[in-house]
Amino acid sequence: MDLKQLEYFVRVAELGSFTRAAIALDVAQPALSRQIRLLEVELRQNLLARNGRGATPTEAGKLLLEHGRGILHQVAVAREELGVARGALAGRVSIGLPPSLSRLITVPLTQAFRAKLPQAQLTLTEGFSLVMIDSLRMGNLDMALLYNPERSPDMEQTLLHEEELVLISPRAEVPEGKGKARAAVALRDAAALPLILPSRPNAFRLLLEAETMRLGCALRIAMEVDGLNAILSLVREGFGHAVLPAYTLANIDHGGALVVRRLQAPRPTSQLTLVRSSRRPSTETQKVARALLQDVVLQAIAPYAN
């Protein structure tokens, strides 16, 4: 079995399309199709069901996909360890970031990575938790930062920070004077405000719903918006309020038009967790990158800590 053929097959199976795979691999589509067909002939199995919408793995293809990812990962590990033997930490490290943290840490993380791992390649992907969990399982991500992930035997989790969510409001709607602009707001009262929240299954949304359910009240949702910058822009223009970690304000230049107030009774707290697949061994480069990521995150959010 040729490793290149295996790589081609895995990429087509993951992307569900010969066209997208050819672009990602930078190869001609006829050559890609020919190599996969040769692999099918060698294995005497149809690995992909081809249709007008793309290609999906057959039962045999699903089995090879599972093994193929592991084989390709082990080859990458072997290459990197050979590099370590000659004194170089190299290879590719792919990290998933949530939108709320992406803008805050992308630049310092890249700077730290280049300084510590100049011969390695960094890939950053912004996404939501469910998508990143699937990418971790498929091997497309080596590690990811997630909020409140569910416990799973195939995922190794490291708690980095517990962050209180805050109420972000347009300044025009917050009373001025005698420190009232910074006064804490009861969660029950915040729930009654017109809120601009992400749709389910966003981690912050689920956390707020669970906390208000315990209080016996419901969230007053004015709008559902699945974009952090869009949410903050709408709040700034007076369309409602948001409940997010305080450091999300680093994502937008609000010019003092937004006011942050703590929530209480109870204080909703979100857990920021570093997650990786426990089924794949970490390379030395990935271990160094993981330590860098932890340091960068903690330094970046320190000014916003409660």
Image (cartoon, rainbow, N blue to C red):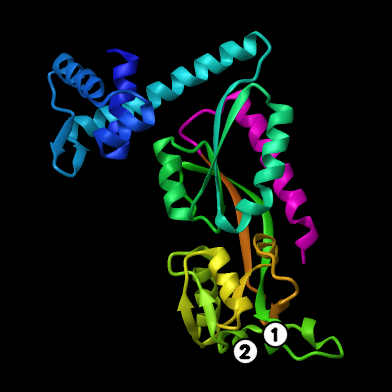
**Residue 100 screen position, x and y as percent:** 60, 59
Q: Which residue is mark 1?
A: 185
Q: Residues within 10 Å of mark 1 (few under 14, many from 20)?
A: some
Out of 196 and 46, give the one closest to the viewer: 196
Q: Which mark is residue 189?
A: 2
- Is residue 280 shown in magenta? yes
Specify the farthest residue to the top: 86
Answer yes or no: is residue 145 visible. Answer: yes
Query: Where are the magenta residues, as a range?
Result: 277-306
Answer yes or no: is residue 294 visible. Answer: no
Q: Is residue 153 above or below residue 227?
A: above
Q: Residue at x 60, y 13 (%)?
A: 83
Q: Quadrant of the C terminus?
A: bottom right
Q: Which mark is residue 245?
A: none
**Residue 129 screen position, x and y as percent:** 48, 54
Q: In the picture provided, is 280 more to the left or to the right than 41?
A: right
Residues marked 2 and 1 touching at CB (< 8 Å): yes
Out of 189 and 4, give the one closest to the viewer: 4
**Residue 274 screen position, x and y as percent:** 60, 46
Out of 243 and 121, give the one closest to the viewer: 121
Q: Residues within 10 Å of mark 2 (few under 14, many from 20)?
A: few
Q: In the picture provided, is 269 more to the left or to the right than 18?
A: right
Amino acid carrying label 2: it is Asp
Out of 79 and 59, give the one closest to the viewer: 79
| Magenta part, dominant SS | helix
Q: Residue at x 51, y 87 (%)?
A: 216
Q: Quadrant of the N terminus?
A: top left
Q: Is residue 154 above or below residue 18?
A: below
Q: Secondary structure at mark 1?
A: strand
